[in-house]
Image (cartoon, rainbow, N blue to C red):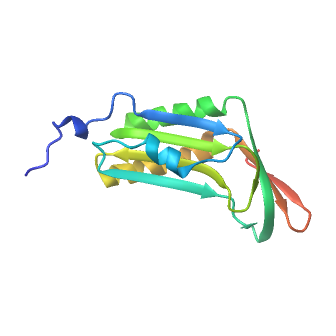
Amino acid sequence: MAPTTDHPGEQPAQDPIKLIAIRDTALSVDEILRAVGDDAAGGTALFVGTVRDHDGGADVDELGYSCHPSAEDEMRRIAEKVVADFPVRALAAAHRVGDLRVGDLAVVVAVSCAHRGEAFEACRRLIDDIKHDVPIWKHQRFSDGTEEWVGV
């Protein structure tokens, strides 16, 4: 069967932004995956950002995220740009604020599209733009007692 773009499943969804959130509670990969579930999607790309135990050669014990009040609106603006640039069936993104420990989920984003390549590209753009443009700041606390603000 020849591929066609005339099928409704090949087109972007009417309202593809399913979830955008800044939360001070634990994030759920399952919630994000459920949000982007779509019968017309042949590919779903997921990115999970976790707190790692090191940065710049120093051991990280914990960190805190804080954000500007406009952070969630900025995430939505980025999501709208992604769905304008890619044939997204569904998109979801959540970022954590507050104190986190090594291994905690800091950010979870997912995008579903009719095809895997589009899903990968859209998800990559989504997370890269969130990390670059959303006013969220990281305060790292190191094992040697020092600390550092990132993104301020």
What residue is shown at x 40% (from left), y 39% (from top)? 90
Above/below status of 69 relative to 33:
above
Q: Describe residue 148's horizontal placement relative to residue 41 as left or right.
A: right
Above/below status of 22 relative to 123:
above
The number of numbered discs placed on residues in the rendered structure image is 0
- Judged from this view, the residue extending furthest toward the bottom is 57
- Judged from this view, the residue extending furthest toward the right is 145
What residue is shown at x 14% (from left), y 43% (from top)? 4
Which of 65 and 148 lies nearest the eye of the viewer?
65
Looking at the rendered image, the quarter that the C terminus falls into is: top right
Position of residue 141 measured from the top left corner of the image (x, y, whole percent): 84, 58
What residue is shown at x 39% (from left), y 28% (from top)? 15
What residue is shown at x 24% (from left), y 40% (from top)? 10
Position of residue 94 measured from the top left corner of the image (x, y, whole percent): 58, 42
Position of residue 89 measured from the top left corner of the image (x, y, whole percent): 35, 39
- Judged from this view, the residue extending furthest toward the left is 1
Above/below status of 20 relative to 115:
above
Q: Describe residue 143's horizontal placement relative to residue 26 as left or right.
A: right
Position of residue 74 measured from the top left corner of the image (x, y, whole percent): 60, 32
